[in-house]
Amino acid sequence: MSDDPAESVTEPTAESDDETAASTDSQSNDEDAFDFDDEVVDENSGADEGATGSKDAGETAADDAEATGEVETLADRVSEYDDDLAAKVADLESRVEALESERDEATERASELESRLKRTQADFQNYKKRAKKRQQQIKDRATEDFVERVVTVRDNLVRALSQDEDADIRDGVESTLKEFDRILEDENVSVIDPEPGTEVDPNRHEVMMRVESDQPADTIADVFQPGYEMADKVIRAAQITVSKDE
């Protein structure tokens, strides 16, 4: 180090100038970097605006095409590259449209059939109710008619019993019995009254006991109580006795 004061002052000044120059360069570089970032931001902003503008333009074009009814089909787009493939695509689109039409018709037909089925079921239920009511009415009227005829028999029996004790009422009772038998006959009711010596029918006869009899063995010996059948259906089996083996 020099003892000269001038030299001492000069050396710090040079170092200070170097530091000042370095600081100036750094500021210049920072300003350049800021300018570059601004340019990048501007470029990106422009790109975004371009993309947004393209999207808006595409949407506007699609809306306009749809509004005018000129919507471009897939086949139209494919025809720009391959006519054969476009023809196949057009055929497929036509088939899809036809199938969709058939589907809609089938859906409508199914709905119609379902409605008809529900109406038919409702009609059938109503028919069953009416038929049941009708059957009950017929049954009630049939019972009413039978009772009207039976009460006549009762009236005749009451009149017979109202006679004097010494009066012979046999003829009147026989007449009343015949009248009652006619009523049963009109109702298709017949008496089960087998003759002695005939074969036993387990479906129409009820064996009460076995007895000694002049009739052949295992045949009807006597009728204890007659039975009744209506339209080939046994209402009450005849109670009988059967002849024993000798």
Image (tube, helix red, strand yellow):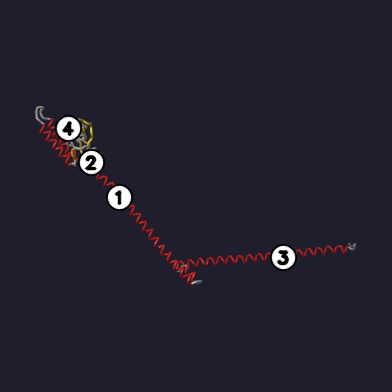
- Asked if 101 appears above or below 79 in the picture, the reply is above
The mark that comes first in sequence, 4 or 2, is 4
The mark that comes first in sequence, 1 or 3, is 3
Taking the view exactly as shown, the residue that stands out farthest to the top is 165
The mark that comes first in sequence, 2 or 3, is 3
- Is any atom of residue 207 visible in this view? yes
Q: In the figure, residue 168 lies in which quadrant?
A: top left
Q: Identify residue for label 2.
A: 233
Q: CA distance from mark 2 to mark 3?
A: 126 Å
Q: CA distance from mark 4 to mark 1?
A: 64 Å
Residue contact at pointers 1 and 2, CB within 8 angstroms = no
Q: Identify residue for label 4.
A: 214
Provide residue 176's location: percent of width, then percent of height. Answer: 13, 35
Q: Identify residue for label 1.
A: 124
Q: Residue at the spot x=61%, y=65% of the render?
A: 44
Q: Identify residue for label 3.
A: 29
Q: CA distance from mark 4 to mark 3?
A: 153 Å
